[in-house]
Amino acid sequence: MNPESMRTAWETFINEGRLSAGVRDIIASSWIKCARNMVDPSQGFGRFADEGMFESIMRANTNLINIAVPIMANLAGTLSGSHFTLVLTDNCGYILEIIGDELSDLDLQCLRFRQGTRWTCDEVGTNAIGLALETDNPIQTAGAEHFCEPHHGWICSAAPIHGANGEIIGCVDISGKIEVAPPHSLGIIHSLALAIESVISQRQESRMMHAILENSRNCVLLLDDDCHCVWLNKRGMDLFGAPDDTSPIGADMRKILLGVDWETVKRMVPVSTECALAFGGRFIDCFAEISPIRDEHGCSGYSVSIRLLEQIIERLNALGVNRAYITFDIFEPVDEFHPGLAGALRTAKSYARYDGHIMIEGESGTGKNIFAQAIHNGSRRASRPFVTVECSSFPRRVIEVEIFGCERHAFHGVYDGPILSRFEMAEGGTIFLNDVDALPLGVQRKLVNCIRDSVTTRVGGTRSRSIDVRVITSTSRDLRQDVKKKLFSRELYALLSSLKLELPPLRERKSDICSMTRKFLGIYNENYPGHKKVLRPDAIQALESYHWPDNTRELLTVVEQAFFSNYDDMSGVISASSLPAQITEGRAAAESVGVTSLPEAYERFERSNIETALRNFGGDAAKAASALGISRASLYRKMKNLGINTKIFRSAKEA
């Protein structure tokens, strides 16, 4: 519609309230709204915000102003002399900045088109700024399309500005006299809005990235293409001691991160490696990830993320790796157990309060691992790692690496390395060497140095690392005899056995079998409440008659087998016939042919042997124990179980 026809259509609407054909829908809808809101078509002057309110508006829009105004000023330079003005508003229509050729004083006085006025359709009638904010679209209003007559000599093009999350945060507008309107002004203003949005998005991404880097638990550095540090985050400044004289800014990181294959890095290949940070007189073990930063010209620098070795270990601990789960609570009340086990429990609790190394002795399956975990959880190191090494599970050539770790290329083609030592992983906590007697003598000698000096050195390495680790070991052998036979290091035995704990076998504490079986069965009953089981007396009798070569571990397996083999038996009873064959067959066979069962025969042999030794040494328990190859504590426990009294043998000698 040409300007004359548009003027006629406007007059018809103002005077008669009737819309003419050809008026754009968006303009027609706005006119109707203005009329409904009783906007005076002869006015259209901007309303100023009060001073305090406008100061608050400007503060709230500081980021928008700082980004938009330089871009607008650059565009205004190309429009110089066109008598057009660029306008920036907030999302409520308040004018924040005006840039460009100034309007005449008469225009300014008439329209109040100045900083601090509100330029919405409700305030000044149909206009480009108001419609752009209302419709969230770029729009142009020209001449009589404006609802208020004082604006009819103007042409305005406006576009909304969106924030990083897509919300409207403001508007840009280009306004001027209609007779000198620049061509494509709507396209120009739309492009201006998009340019501002692009910078806002980039700034937001930059702020987020900066926040991520600053709040990272890792030390993050940016290097130039010559590997010199140009930036580091707060964690990095803490690590390096910056900002003071020790700041790494400008330093060549190739001289600081030792052990990194910098030749590979320079070939723009990402590198992840364990290394050492040597800076300010310190030497810190860490893990570095180095990646090239690429641009259109190739590599412009490198990003480096450094994690301390202790951080990696802490992460493993947080995931439940290297953790002790068992506490002394599972043995409560202690008085319910056989005196031999109850005594061991009291000793273990006492040991937990100290920090000396402990050796746990006992047959296979007596619960040495359980006691080790409980001691750790009862100590001051409970919150730190509990690392287990099954010494008998690894080949001789592998066990040294498992315990002490190895450096890169220590074994070409076998380990890529580097591998953390178990002592490093246990830092501040406990390392449990199960079946320590299985260690080769060469590893034993290295372990002596490690424990005595509180340092560890990886295989293939030369640098020693200080450690703070408590060592708990276990063995099912008489290591004193192994020491005499030179099968075990005397010095290592002395270091490891400063605190000794001996666990009695299950066959020597038959009174525990019933209570322990009921406790194990209770666990399965609790986990499977629809299939609860109880033990018949004949089952308990069979269990107590068995000799338990694998001790508590075997008892737990037997209870599990009995429970699940009768899982669908709704009677809820476990009888002797429900038990595994090895429990009942030996006793039944012995009774059928009139022979003594092996457990009974062993008990008779053991009694006879002990009595002979005591008789030969006149009741001297220490000498008798030495001759039998057992500890004095073990001898006293066996004598108690067998009902042997040393006084008889002392009296016989005196007589």
Image (cartoon, helix red, strand yellow):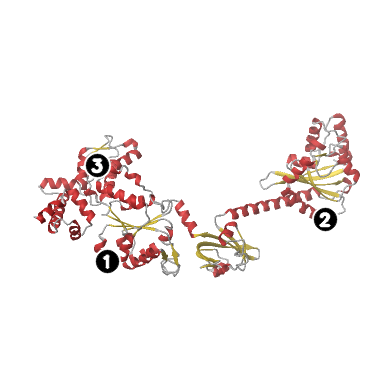
Q: Is residue 617 above or below residue 260?
A: above
Q: Is residue 423 above or below residue 554?
A: below
> What crowding class fits label 1: few (fewer than 14 Cα within 10 Å), some (14-19), or many (20 or more)?
some
Q: Residue furthest top?
A: 16
Q: Residue furthest front?
A: 654
Cα distance in 3D space between marks 1 and 3: 39 Å
Q: Nearer the viewer, mark 1 or mark 2?
A: 1
Q: Amino acid at mark 2?
A: Gly
Q: Nearer the viewer, residue 570 or 455?
A: 455
User: Badges 3 and 2: C-beta atoms under 8 Å apart?
Assistant: no
Q: Nearer the viewer, residue 451 or 439?
A: 451
Q: Secondary structure at mark 2?
A: helix
Residue 21 image offset from top left, x and y in percent: 82, 35
192 left or right of 416 in image: right
Residue 582 image offset from top left, x and y in percent: 21, 48
Q: Secondary structure at mark 1?
A: loop
Would residue 160 be seen by someone viewing this image from the given angle?
no
> What crowding class fits label 2: few (fewer than 14 Cα within 10 Å), some (14-19), or many (20 or more)?
few
Which residue is tagged 3? 514
User: Badges 1 and 3: C-beta atoms under 8 Å apart?
Assistant: no
Which residue is tagged 1? 487
Would residue 531 be seen by someone viewing this image from the given angle?
yes
Q: Amino acid at mark 3?
A: Cys
Q: Which mark is residue 77?
A: 2
> What crowding class fits label 3: few (fewer than 14 Cα within 10 Å), some (14-19), or many (20 or more)?
some
Residue 4 image offset from top left, x and y in percent: 89, 39
Sequence-first tag of 3 and 2 = 2
529 left or right of 580 in image: right
